[in-house]
Amino acid sequence: MTPLILISNDDGLDSRGLSALIEAMRPLGDVFVCAPDGPRSGASCSITDTVPLKCWQVSSEPGLEVYACTATPCMCTKLAIDCLMPRRPDLVVAGINHGSNASVNHHYSGTTAVTTEGALQGIASVAFSLDDHDTEAPLDHIVPICRRIASLVLEHGLSFGTYLNVNFPPGKDLRGIRVCRMAYSRWVNEFEPCPRSRGGQWYWLCGEQVDEEPESTDTDLWAMRHHYVAITPINIDPTDHKLKESMESWGNLTI
């Protein structure tokens, strides 16, 4: 049976990154797109349960169905799998996001929320992001790499509850691909006061990402700084198993 691939994103239906990802996936199977009707960056795994969602078909042709939805990326993914698709997808892919989702960014990202939902559903999933916020940044060199990674996932599968977070460095000078762990980083100086706030203080979200382990050569941030494509396997189970074992020996956790 021809593979069925679900695509969503957080930059919205009109994103060039989404068009590039559709181009990358079409040779691999039938493609079904359900994307937000506008930008939803930073939405993480947020859901909507206070208002109904509107969804409509944008286009239809052999091998490609496209829907828009007034929802977050996570909800677009849920709706497509539960209500819209003719059958359960073989693969969920997200992106291509304009901006890095490496390291701590993966926690906030609407792009990786798509693959988190796919992994929660037990479906092999891959998120693709480019560390370049320029909406006109070149994507042609990324398309065949996305296709190759997706084809390998279709061939080999992923263990239950995992997805791949793939991040491309800016520019076309790529040295190769590295499988990495997520770097420990954090955002600092995150808010800038608006100069003429009225009725209370207003703020713009800004800031800069600080790599707390810049010399570690096995992280996604190091790989991208050195012009490698970074692939980070992510597990949806955040349990700290070492701490769990330690706590079991505390001996006084009784009621």
Image: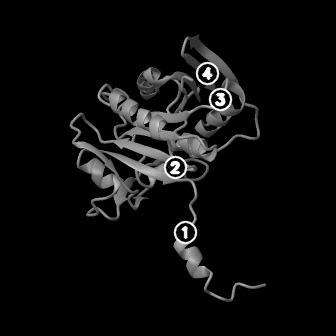
In the displayed structure image, the side of residue 190 where residue 90 appears, left or right: right
Which is closer to the viewer, label 1 or label 3? 1
Q: Could you tell me which residue is drawn at 58 percent across and 45 percent down?
A: 119
Which is closer to the viewer, label 3 or label 4? 4
Whole-angstrom CA distance, mark 4 to mark 1, is 39 Å
Whole-angstrom CA distance, mark 1 to mark 2, is 20 Å
Q: Earlier in the sequence, mark 1 or mark 3?
A: 3
Q: Secondary structure at mark 2?
A: helix
Q: Which mark is residue 70?
A: 3
Q: Secondary structure at mark 4?
A: strand
Please say if 236 is above or below 250: above
Quadrant (top left/top right/bottom left/bottom right) for the C terminus: bottom right
Q: Which mark is residue 67?
A: 4
Which is closer to the viewer, label 4 or label 2? 4
Please say if 46 is above or below 25: below
In the rendered structure, which amino acid carries the disc numbered 3? Thr
Q: Where in the figure is residue 134, as x and y percent of width and height?
A: 35, 32
Q: Where in the figure is residue 92, as x and y percent of width and height?
A: 54, 35
Q: Residue furthest top?
A: 61
Q: Earlier in the sequence, mark 2 or mark 3?
A: 3
- Give the labeled residue for mark 1: 240
In the rendered structure, which amino acid carries the disc numbered 1? Asp
Q: Earlier in the sequence, mark 4 or mark 2?
A: 4
- Give the labeled residue for mark 2: 108
Q: Residue furthest right?
A: 255
